[in-house]
């Protein structure tokens, strides 16, 4: 089984990135051949500073490795180190119906958040489909909000198979990938209670310094329930975040404190900060070790690019032959 996932180098990674994508990705290393790409091509729809993009790519690589990605079991590479993906994206775009792209939720959402209506933003699902199909991916772990992208990828694969598959005996140019929905993506609230996102400014960074992380945690929005009154843990951002990093017994103890009353939100925030700082301590240590070896990141990305190109070129030879190129 081949597993594919990508992460955008849009800035400093936060705990929503970790629990939504990185932690599940690390776990999936044991299930099959895992390929993880740093989506710098996709990032061009929003990042306009070339130095920042390059720096963000390296930061993502460092942070992903610090959080447990094992380059001996998984392939980590930069999107742009596999040029075949843009070739496939163009071929897919020649059969992609306009109506399919016009129905993309992500395009509408990004316009609503103030991004410019560019061709790249509009055709984003086509590049994403190329990302997936070019590696003969079997499984793509995504949040529920990205399920539509996998459905669109399957639609484009079916269309290619129908139009050009007659040149192959089995009629299949592409295999159809399956989405694996990651429920944790929806359960990581930011400090304002919305889904944690850098663009919302409600994030708590994984590797921020101690003072900044404490400040962000202590600024979590709460209601006006008095200290002595019982509180509903199900409606609390503090408790939801605590549940991600605490043990079952610790969760139960905090839940009891909420329901009993007599403890203020300030005290709960202090407990949350202590647990977050403790949880990510081993990863901070590993990150320091990685940064101490100046050549390590380059060697990992070079090795990953070599493996990714090997797979991509095999698929593109099949595609080129099917559509009549070369």
Image (tube, grey):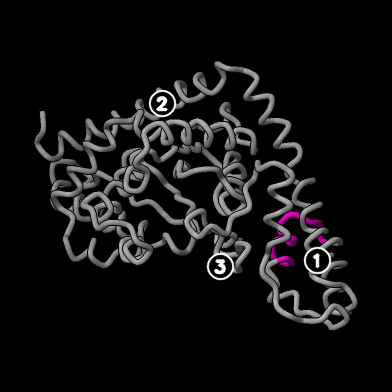
* Circle 3 crowding by C-alpha within 10 Å: few under 14, some 14–19, many from 20: some
**Callout 1: 10 Å neighbours few (<14), some, many (20+)?**
some
Q: Nearer the viewer, mark 3 or mark 2?
A: 3
Kindly report the secondary structure that dominates the magenta region of the rendered protein. helix
Q: Of helix, strand and loop, which one carries label 1?
A: helix
| Residue 241 falls inside the magenta stretch | yes
Marks 1 and 3 close (CB-CB < 8 Å): no
Q: Look at the numbered disc 2 and give the secondary structure of its residue.
A: helix
Spatial CA distance of label 1 from label 3 is: 20 Å
Query: Could you say which quadrant of the image residue 270 lies in?
Result: bottom right
Left or right for 299, reference 245: left
Kindly identify the residue that appears in the image at 15 percent across and 39 percent down: 322
CB under 8 Å between discs 3 and 2: no
**Quarter that holds the C terminus:** top left
Q: Which residue is mark 1?
A: 266
Disc 3 target residue: 194
Instruction: Please indicate, yes or no, whether residue 6 appears anywhere in the rendered image.
Output: no
Q: Specify which label sits upstream in the sequence, 3 or 2.
A: 3
* Residue named by callout 2: 305
């Amino acid at each position: 089984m081949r597993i594919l996932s990508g992460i955008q180098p849009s800035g400093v990674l936060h705990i929503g990135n970790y629990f939504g994508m990185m932690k599940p990705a690390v776990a999936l290393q044991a299930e099959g051949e895992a390929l993880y790409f740093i989506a710098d091509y996709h990032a061009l729809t929003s990042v306009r500073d070339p130095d920042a993009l390059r720096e963000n790519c390296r930061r993502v690589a460092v942070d992903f490795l610090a959080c447990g990605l094992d380059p001996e079991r998984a392939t980590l590479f930069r999107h742009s180190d596999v040029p075949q993906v843009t070739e496939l994206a163009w071929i897919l775009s020649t059969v992609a119906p306009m109506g399919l792209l016009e129905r993309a939720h992500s395009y509408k959402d990004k316009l609503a958040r103030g991004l410019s209506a560019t061709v790249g933003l509009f055709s984003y699902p086509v590049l994403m489909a190329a990302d997936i199909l070019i590696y003969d991916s079997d499984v793509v772990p995504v949040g529920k909000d990205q399920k539509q992208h996998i459905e669109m990828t399957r639609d484009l694969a079916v269309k290619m198979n129908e139009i050009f598959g007659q040149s192959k005996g089995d009629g299949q140019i592409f295999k159809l990938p399956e989405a694996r929905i990651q429920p944790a993506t929806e359960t990581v609230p930011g400090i304002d209670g919305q889904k944690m996102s850098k663009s919302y400014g409600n994030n708590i960074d994984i590797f921020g310094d101690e003072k900044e992380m404490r400040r962000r945690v202590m600024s979590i929005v709460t209601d006006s329930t008095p200290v002595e009154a019982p509180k509903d843990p199900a409606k609390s951002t503090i408790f939801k975040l605590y549940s991600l990093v605490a043990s079952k017994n610790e969760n139960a103890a905090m839940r009891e404190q909420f329901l009993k009353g007599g403890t203020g939100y300030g005290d709960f925030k202090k407990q949350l900060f202590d647990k977050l700082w403790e949880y990510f301590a081993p990863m901070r240590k590993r990150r320091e070790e990685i940064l101490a070896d100046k050549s390590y990141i380059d060697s990992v990305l070079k090795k990953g690019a070599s493996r990714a190109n090997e797979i991509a070129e095999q698929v593109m030879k099949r595609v080129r032959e099917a559509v009549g190129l070369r």
